[in-house]
Image (cartoon, grey):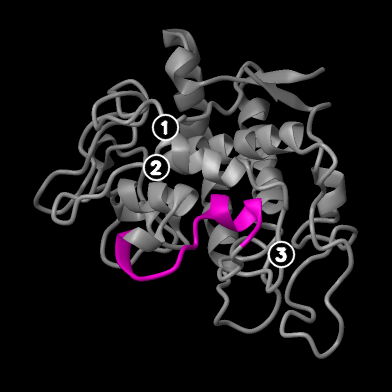
Amino acid sequence: MVYTRKDVSTLTGTERRRFVAALLDIKRSGEYDEFVRMHIDYYVSDGEGGLRTAHMAPSFLPWHRRFLLDLETALRRVDPSVTLPYWDWTRDRGKTSVPWTEDLLGGDGRGSDRQVTTGPFAYATGNWTLKEGVTDTEFLTRDLGRARDPIELPLESDVEWALEDPLYDASPWNSTSPQGFRNKLEGWGTGRGSAAWRNHNRVHRWVGGAMVGGASVNDPVFWLHHAYIDLLWTRWQQRHHDHRYQPAEPPAAGSGQYRRIVARHEKLPPWDVTPDQLEDAGRIYRYA
């Protein structure tokens, strides 16, 4: 049966409590930290050797679609009523608006060390100790809007700039691709600093703290952010229904991307599934 993913701002009090409770349950069991480890393992950049699947590659969108489905499956084993909500950061833009409320994700980090001290994921609750990708802290950190070097969340016009491109992706199939919806949405721009961060990337930077880097899954907002990214892919597909995931065929031997990216019908590690099989999730879920 097809289930529905809702805008987080529309969740009822009961739906909020159930979502948080399910997250805390899989954190207690250790299953949540397996998701953090997986994302760290597959956080491979242009400058590294080998296959890139999760980032800076055409498979950014299908990889995270499957990643979200796995997390959602884990949550629904705990509570079948739970689905992943999405955070529309073009509309809910305040530091105290949804999802930064006491009954959802808690708020900003405190000024001294950026530790999140409010909400169910605050370190003091004893329910959310960071165990993977930890450098010098075991507590969740945030720096909403970057206090010392402020940036703004992407606007609806930034999203539209990506959505209007009918091309899914283009050579060289990485963070420097000047055309294509994938890289415009993932957000690797030109130049330095905040001007180079667009859409998806800018949101990670705006949240700050744990959301910056491969261990970003340590902050539960990761899932709400990527559910919205997945929704935007769905909208792009609806608008450009004649266009598909690219590349259709693997880059040839001698190419700079030979064996470095996943073509449409190739397996997408670490799963036994292809981007082609992940292009349509309409039989599993829909968005409200």
Determine the residue positioned at 15% across, 54% down.
113
Outermost residue toward the bottom in this view: 254
Residue at numbered disc 3: 170
Tell which circle, 3 or 2, labels the residue nearer the N-terminal end.
2
* Amino acid type, residue under disc 2 in the picture: Pro
Residue at numbered disc 1: 90
Q: Is residue 29 visible?
A: no
Tell which circle, 1 or 3, labels the residue nearer the N-terminal end.
1
Element type at marker 3? loop
Question: Against 287, is 49 above or below?
Answer: below
CB under 8 Å between discs 2 and 1: yes
Q: Is residue 183 left or right of residue 265?
A: left
Residue 59 in the image, given as x and y percentages of width and height: 71, 58
Residue 260 in the image, given as x and y percentages of width and height: 73, 76
Quarter where residue 226 is shown? top right
In the image, 166 versus 36, the foreground residue is: 166
Report the magenta residues as a range: 179-194
Element type at marker 2? loop
Determine the residue positioned at 46% across, 47% down.
199
Mark number displayed over residue 154: 2
CB under 8 Å between discs 1 and 3: no
Measured Cα–Cα span from mark 1 to mark 3: 26 Å
* Residue 105 drawn in magenta: no
* Amino acid type, residue under disc 3 in the picture: Ala
Residue 94 in the image, given as x and y percentages of width and height: 27, 29
Determine the residue positioned at 81% across, 46% down.
243
Question: Against 153, is 47 above or below?
Answer: below
Measured Cα–Cα span from mark 2 to mark 1: 6 Å
